[in-house]
Image (cartoon, rainbow, N blue to C red):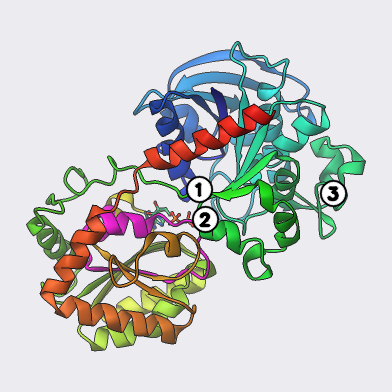
Amino acid sequence: MRILFATSEARPLIKTGGLADVSGALPVALRAIGLDCRLLLPGYPAVIAGCVDVKPVCALNGLPGDVVANLLEASMPDNGMPLYIVDAPELYQRKGGPYQDIAGHDHPDNALRFAVFSKVAAMLAASDTPLDWHPDLLHCNDWQTGLAPAYLRLSGETTPSIMTVHNLAYQGVFPRANMSLVGLPPESFAIDGVEYYGSLSFLKAGLYYADRLTTVSPSYAEEIRLPALGMGMQGLLSTRGADLVGILNGIDTEEWDPANDPHLPHKFSARSRAGKQRCKSKLQQDLNLEPNKDAPLFGVIARLAHQKGLDLILAVADGILHRGGQIALLGTGEKVLEAAFRDLGALHPGQVASVIGYDEGLSHRIEAGSDIFLMPSRFEPCGLNQLYSLRYGTIPVVHATGGLKDTVEDGVTGFVFEEPTAHALWLAVDRALRAHADKKAWKRMMRAAMSRDFSWEKSAREYEALYRSMLETA
Ligand code: ADP
């Protein structure tokens, strides 16, 4: 089976969030079970500089905005995963991140940038593909690839497509005036089409035109059909309910392996946990926290966004400190939250360490050195950090939503609370603190958490079954 996996970010080349982790790992897991999966990525500077074995394939003509682009083929530097790259310097070769400039403002031409990317995905999957490799199926991810199923379907192509929603909150909404720029027929600007509350939504296009829809956990697949978490798409998603499934993400168990993690000062495993205690002491030292091995250390790693419920953590922080706990936070994002956590750190030196920034090595060391991980997300499509926490024996405290609910077992591998309120979080933190004080109970929970299997192979098999069912009915 030949699968073209179109994504706007993939580890280790370019990452802003969980999408990059999935795109870096799922295609590799699909290849490992015998599928011929290849990635399609935009040619950002980090992608061009980081990939290997780059060769030109062809010029790409007929793109939105008459953009000049070339298709390259290359490989991932770490595992040889085959890549196609859309090399369009005027769109992708610029400073800043994939979606925003250095000042944190969206690139003003994002509609064109990702219309072109989507168009190339559709061209490569079409019957007259310029490749000597014809994909059986196009797998699209998030709004940046949302127009691809629309281009395919509206040009009468029959290659089936999947739209995977990694986070419904990001919808690629642009003014209607972009319709002619992106090259969609005016009649597709309708409820049964790409129109979304008077604007053009790239995600809606994908959700409407793709043959099948997936999201990254079974619970989130249910939640997004309802108004509370449907983000305005609930009508379409419930109409398409029969085509929508949730497949839980896995984690990269080689990258996140406490027994073999190059970021850690000491290694450990479910059977031999002494290294974890040493990781904690080293973390306390590195972050200027009091060197107290009995103090329950709470880790937090997150994009500092409303979604992640960090205001709830701020609300319970005093309670945690009062009970002798420590907090180690790593994150960047909304300025108000950055300032609030900086202030908390300044107010409680030795007890709270707030590191504002993006630091992969430190994220591994916090996962390893913490006792408890806080993840009170208001919604969470799948979530990765609670999975890393389980694997590192760091007991997660999570809100019962989406993938958090599907992966953390209350009282067995973690603590789960029902309402996204400070009070409910506090009650769960209190339970975690009591359990932490009981060495036997804590050891039992750590062992249970570390024994859970979230490797990608299981998820890859579910995607394979979905692809097969689509090709049978195509
Ligand atoms: P989301 O995709 O919504 O940000 P996930 O939990 O699915 O949330 O994935 C977040 C990923 O980004 C994880 O791999 C996490 O470790 C990483 N991450 C988030 N913030 C930081 C940071 N400041 N430094 C290092 N890694 C981070």
Amino acid type for the residue under numbered disc 3: Asp
Give residue 351's quadrant in the image: bottom left
Magenta span contains residue 378: yes
| Three-letter code for the amino acid on which mark 2 is drawn | Pro
In-image side of 187 versus 323 (left or right): right
Per the image, the residue denoted by label 3 is 192
Crowding around mark 3 (Cα neighbors within 10 Å: few <14, some 14 to 19, many 20+) is some
Q: Is residue 191 left or right of residue 211?
A: right
- Tell which circle, 2 or 3, labels the residue nearer the N-terminal end: 3
Does ligand 1 reach within 8 Å of label 3's beta carbon?
no
Residues at discs 1 and 2 in contact (Cβ within 8 Å): yes
In the image, what residue occupies the spot 62% across and 59% down? 169
Residue 247 got which mark?
A: 1
Ligand 1's quadrant is: bottom left
Foreground pick, 419 / 20: 419
Label 2 element class: helix
Calculate the distance from the C-alpha at mark 2 to the C-alpha at mark 3.
26 Å
Q: Is residue 76 visible?
A: no
Q: Where residue 103 sits: x, y (%)?
A: 56, 55
Q: Is residue 230 visible?
A: yes
Q: Which residue is mark 2?
A: 218
Q: Nearer the viewer, residue 74 or 45?
A: 74
Task: Give the position of the C terminus as an image quadrant.
Answer: top right
